[in-house]
Image (cartoon, rainbow, N blue to C red):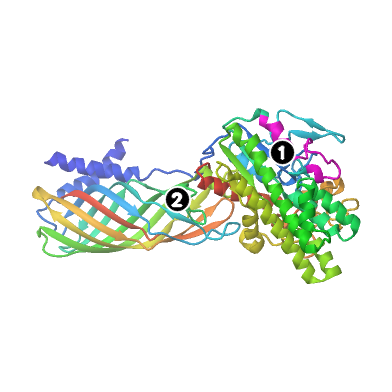
Amino acid sequence: MKNTKQFLLVPALLLCAAAAQAQTAGTWLLRAGATKITPNVTSDDLTAPSLAGTKASIGSSSRLSGGITYMVDNNLAIDVPVAVPFQHDISGDGAILGAGKIGDVKALPATVMAQWRFLEPNAPVRPYIGAGITYAAFYGAKSTSTLTALTGGTPANPTTLSVDSKWAATLQLGASFQLKDGWFIDASYTVTPLRTRTTLSSGQTLDTTLNPSSFSLSIGMRF
Amino acid sequence: MKQWKWAVVATSCAIVLAGCGGASDGSDTTPKTVAPSVKVFGDSIMDSGTFGYKFTIQSADASKPFLIFPEVVAANFGVSNLCAFFRFNGTTFVPNTSCTSFAVGGGRVNNLTNTSAPSNAVPFSIPYQMSVGAATLSASDLVIVDGGGNDLADLTGAYLGATTPAGIATYMNLLGTLLPPATVSAIIGSTPTATSMGTAAGAYAQAVGQTLAAAVKTNIVAKGVNKVVVVNSPDITVTPRFMAVLSAVAAAGGTAQRDAVQAAVRAWTAAFNGALAQGLAGTNVQLYDLNTEGGKISATPAQFALTNITTPACPKVAGGLDSTTGQASLSQPATVVACNSASMSANIPVGETAADWWTRYAYSDNFHPTPALHKLIGQSINLQLAKAGWL
C-alpha cells in the first residue's frame, strides 16, 4: 500500500513541477469529466441456426472520464484519455427486433492520441485535431435469459456470449477553452472505425460494425 | 489552489484505477417470468412421455433427455421437469397427478375419427385433456395447446380412400362426426366428385378449428389464465410420411393429381388454422403460427443448420415400420428402441460423414421432429413470447 502511494505520487509531482502559464511546450494538462460513447451499429446476421436477418443493436453508454495531455511543443500534444469502464446494452434487431435486451458487455477503450493544437499557446480557445490508436477491450459480457430463450437454451444450459477485443484507429476533433488560473474546459468528439465479432456459447457468431463515436466534456487544470 | 490541483490528480488516478477492474462472461439464468406450472394439451409433438417415451430421437444419456418444444418453452419459464399426466400402462391411461403435460400421442381435436378409440371422453381427445387439466389451472400458469395435425391426417386418409362406394360412405361418416350429416350430403351432392368431397373436407377442417378454439376458451381462457399459447397446424404435406403418400398418388394418377391432393390438404390446413385464429380473436391467447414459421424452415433449411428435411433419421428396423409407407415410425416400439442417439452416431448412414449427422435432420421418424427441429420451434415460440414481453 505504501509503495502504491509513492508510485502514484511520482507522476503527480512531475506534473506539478511542470506548471506553466499556458499550453506551451512541456505543459501537462489534466482533466476530468464525462464521456458518452455511441456505437453506430451495422449488424450482420447471426450465423445458422437462426431466423434470417437476426441482428443486434448496441446501446450508448456514459461514464466519468478524464485524461492527461503532454505538450511536446507549443502545438503538438500527446493525449491519453481514461474512463470508468463503459457498459453497453445489446438488444435484438432485425428479425428479433422487439425481443428486448439480450445481453450487455463492458468496454474499456485504451487510446493514445497525437494532437495538433492550433493557435497560440495562450489563445482563449484552442481547437485541435487528433489521431491515435485504440485498443477496445470488451469483457464481462453477460447474456440475459431472453438470449437463452431465443437460442433454444434453458436456464440449466444458458447461452452466453463473448465479444472480441480489437485494435482500431481513432480520429478526434476538439477544443480547449481557457479559464482563469490555469483551468480550462475541454470538449472533444472522436470516431473509431471498429468491427468486432460476438460469439455465442452455441458456436454461432455475429459480426457487427460498431464505429463508435464519443463526446467528452471535461474540466481541467494545466501544470 | 495547490489543494485543488492535488484533488484533480487524485481523481484522475482513481479513474485510471477504476478501469482496471475485471469481470468474466456469464449469464442471467433467472427467467423473466417464472410460471408456477406449465400445462400442456395436445398431440404427439407435445407428448412428454405418455407411452414411456417421447416421439423423437431418444437420448442415450437418460440424465440428459432431449427436449421437445413445449419443454424448451417451459424451461425458459422456470419449469424444467415437464412429465406426462396420463400414463399408458398397456391397457389404460393412469393419471399421474404430479405431472402437468396432458398431451397424448395420437391426440385429436375430434377423436371420434380415431378408429382405435373413437370417443371424446378419453385422453386422445384434446378437449378432454383440457377438461381434466382445467380443474387445477391457476391464473399464473403458462398453458400451451396444439392440435389439428392428426385430425387433418385422418381426413386426408379417408379422402384418399373415397374411391369406392364403401370408401365414400366411410368418408361421409367421418365428416358426419363433426358436421351435420345433412350439411355433408348437401355439399357432396348425389354424385360425389373429388371437388365436392374436397369442399366438404374444407368445411370439416374449419369445424375442427372452431372446436379447438371453443375448447380453449371454455377450459382455459374462461379460467382467467393470463399466459396461453396455442400452436396452429403445420403443413403436414412436407412430412416424410405425407411425401411418401403423395409419391404413391403420383405413381397411380400422375403428378397433376399429386399436386391437386397436396393443394387440397394445404387448403384444409388453412381452413383449420383460419377458424382457429378467428375463434381465438379477441382473447389474450398468443397464437403461434407454426404453419408459417415451419414453412420458413422448410424453405431455407441451411439457415437453420439442417441438411436433410425429407428423410427420417430413425433407422428402419424389422417391426418398426409404418404399415402404409414402409418408413420408420415411432408409433412402433422397435423403432423407439433403435432410434437412439448412441446407436445412430455409431451407425453413420451412407451419404453422411459425422457421428452427429442426425442433429442436422428435421424428422426423426416419418412424422415427428428431431430434437434439433424441436429446439428451433421452441426458440421460435420463445421469440414471439419475448416480443410479447413474457420472456
| Amino acid type at mark 1 | Pro
Q: Which mark is residue A90?
A: 2
- At horizontal 77% and vertical 63% (from top left) the residue drawn is B195
Mark 1 element type = helix
Whether residue B369 appears in this view of the structure is no
Residue B97: which quarter of the image?
A: top right
User: Percent position (x, y) of residue B317?
Assistant: 88, 53
**Membership of B115 in magenta stretch:** yes
Bounds of the magenta segment: B111-134
User: Percent position (x, y) of residue B33?
Assistant: 53, 37
Tell me: A215 left or right of A163.
left
Q: Are marks 1 and 2 in contact (CB under 8 Å)?
A: no
**Membership of A218 in magenta stretch:** no
Q: Which mark is residue B127?
A: 1
Tell me: A5 left or right of B49.
left
Whether residue B273 appears in this view of the structure is yes
| Amino acid type at mark 2 | Ile
Q: Which chain is disc 1 placed on?
A: B
- At horizontal 22% and vertical 50% (from top left) the residue drawn is A218
Tell me: A192 left or right of B56.
left
- At horizontal 82% and vertical 71% (from top left) the residue drawn is B254
Relative depth, front residue between A109 and B64? B64
